[in-house]
Image (tube, rainbow, N blue to C red):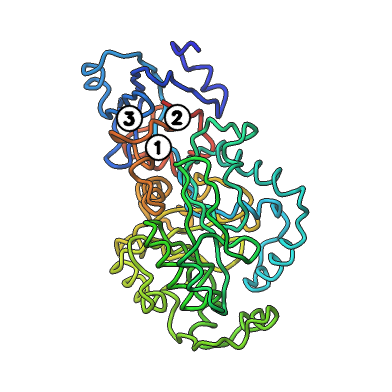
Amino acid sequence: MNFESVSSYIKSPNSQITESPNSLCLHIARWVVPVSRHPIENGAIATFKGKIIDVGPASEIRSSYSADIKDHGDSILCPALINTHSHLELSPLKRHFSPSSSFVGWVRSLVEARDQIRAEDWVPAISSAIREMRKNGIIAVGDVGNLDIIPLFFSSKNDGTWPFSGIFFHELICPAPNGAEEEIFLSAPFVNGKINEPMDIPRPSFHYSFSAHAPYSVAPSVLKAIKAWDRSHNMPFSIHVAESEDEIEFLQGGHGPLIELMKEKGHWPLDYDLPKVSPVRYLESLGLLDRHTVCVHCVQVDRDDIAILAKTGAGVCLCPRSNMFLGVGAAPSEELYAAGVSLALGTDSLASNDQLSIFAEMASLSEVAPCLPPEAIFRAGTRGGAKALGISGEVGSLAEGKNATFLSVESGPVGVKEVLEFLVHEGYKKLGYWIIG
């Protein structure tokens, strides 16, 4: 391929440029946004053998290396994006639901609809969702579910050359322990309700972890067993936390529509006492909050909850578009950020979102949290997600030693004060192509 000019790629959105794996190459552009440092005007990225070896002003990088130069013009080179929370197995339910005003009602409908998905619909829908994430510049994903979908990331149909990485979180719903604690700690994923050997993860870039569905749907002893398994395998622990007022009602007061759902599923009464505190304080009391915990949603949290999250180092994955669709409110992201809580972004599933785009999540977050700085929003979609998934040594920022996979966003002549604002508000419209070094 001739790389003397990249103008043809700018005219063809989402094209992919792949360098020779052994070539030293300098990518220069109007802006380079490393995330780990301030944006660099007239910046450059030096890549070699699939890794970034240097990032800095183009004048300095060009004087330090003798290499092929790829000039990306008036574009922004930035890290590929991280989708910290998704449920790809729900992709067959895209556009199946209308925006909801009842969280428990939506959950009830979701369970019924999932049970009716035809076997032949799973793979096409999930494959399409994976291609959509790739099209939207997502390089890593924290996927939650029960189906073994990881091989689909690397199939030829989904262009297995795109170097997806991330974690498959095998999700457990277990209101009654029934001895599950011992089985979890000693073994690997549940398949059809039974314990089996670990799933065959086809590439070392993908990892496996247990996750708990929510504080109200997993018994406390099982929550602790899941966290212990994840900790012993050096994997993050992911859990939906404080997503709705129904959850708060149930855990704090022992009443509300969740009890009716529990009764329908045969899980009521419980064989343990409800905590009578907030979900965040409950998880803290169980010793589950630390820097390896990803609390997804955190819509219904107060100042005390935020202080606990900050103190323990637990991260929060925001899913603003899903929260809006379900009518559960907006997470207090400005307060979380001000308290020093590490933020990430996720799309959630296509059952509660119409697209799998972290750029779209950034734009939505900026609308519901207008005082949140654009650098914080973009960090949540990149470095924050990589930190949450434990893969920040590979992706999430542009720095020496990181994987040489990044995005080119067509920007025109924007200034230093506008470059991150542009990425947050216009990135989903202007993504031009990917570079794989």
Answer with mark 3 or mark 2, whichever residue precedes in sequence: 3
Q: Is residue 52 above or below residue 370?
A: above
Are the residues flagged by discs 3 and 1 in contact, CB closer than 8 Å? no
Q: Which residue is label 3 attached to?
A: 52
| Secondary structure beneath label 2 | strand
| Secondary structure beneath label 3 | strand
Q: Name the residue located 42 percent from the left edge and 32 percent from the top edge.
A: 405
Q: Nearer the viewer, mark 3 or mark 1?
A: 3
Provide residue 267's location: percent of width, then percent of height.
Answer: 63, 81
Q: Nearer the viewer, mark 3 or mark 2?
A: 3
Q: Is residue 45 left or right of residue 227?
A: left
Q: Which residue is label 1 attached to?
A: 79
Task: Judge the density around disc 2: few (<14), some (14-19), many (≥20) Cα neighbours within 10 Å.
Answer: many
Provide residue 196's location: percent of width, then percent of height.
Answer: 57, 59
| Secondary structure beneath label 1 | strand
Q: Is residue 49 above or below residue 381?
A: above
Q: Which residue is label 2 attached to?
A: 408
The amino acid type, in three-letter code, at marker 1 is: Pro
Quadrant containing the C terminus is: top left
Q: Is residue 273 left or right of residue 94?
A: left
Between residues 219 and 433, which one lies in front from this camera angle? 219
The amino acid type, in three-letter code, at marker 3 is: Ile
Provide residue 179's location: percent of width, then percent of height.
Answer: 53, 77
Task: Judge the density around disc 1: few (<14), some (14-19), many (≥20) Cα neighbours within 10 Å.
Answer: many
